[in-house]
Amino acid sequence: MGDLLKRIAIDSKVMAGKPVIKGTRLTVEHILRELAGGMTASDLLDAHPRLTPEDIRAACAYAAARLAEEQILVDVE
C-alpha cells in the first residue's frame, strides 16, 4: 500500500490542500464520491484520461489509511 500512497499529494497551493492524485487537480474526495455515486473505474478512466487504475486504487488506499487512524469513542453505560 505504501507505493500507492506515493501517488497522493497534499499541497496547500493545490485544491486548498486537499489530497489529490499527484500531478493532477483530481481530489481523493472527488474520486471516492464518483465511485460511491455509481461510476465504475472504467467510467472514471474514460472521464479523466490522465487517471490510471493505480490512481483510483491509491485514492481508496489513502481513504482507508486515514480511516484506520480515526479514533472512535464508545459510550459505555
Image (tube, rainbow, N blue to C red):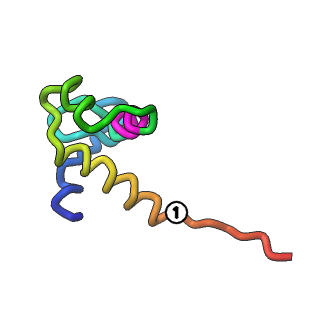
In which quadrant is the C terminus drawn? bottom right
Q: Residue at x 13, y 30 (%)?
A: 50
Q: Residue at x 31, y 36 (%)?
A: 40
Q: Secondary structure at mark 1?
A: loop
Image check: 15 left or right of 33? left
Part of the protein shown in magenta: 29-35
Depth order, front residue of 71/60? 60
In which quadrant is the N terminus drawn? bottom left
Image check: 5 left or right of 17? left
Q: Which residue, given by chain and number where applicable, does mark 1 sit on?
A: 70
Q: In which quarter of the view is residue 13 placed?
A: top left
| Disc 1: CA contacts within 10 A as few (<14), some (14-19) or many (>=20) | few
Helix, strand or loop for the magenta stretch, by majority:
helix
Q: Is residue 71 above or below residue 9?
A: below
Residue type highlighted by circle 1 = Glu
Q: In which quarter of the view is residue 55 placed?
A: top left
Q: Residue furthest top?
A: 47
Depth order, front residue of 14/62? 62
Q: Is residue 21 above or below residue 48?
A: below
x, y percent for residue 28 = 34, 40
x, y percent for residue 63 = 39, 52
Q: Residue at x 33, y 30 (%)?
A: 15
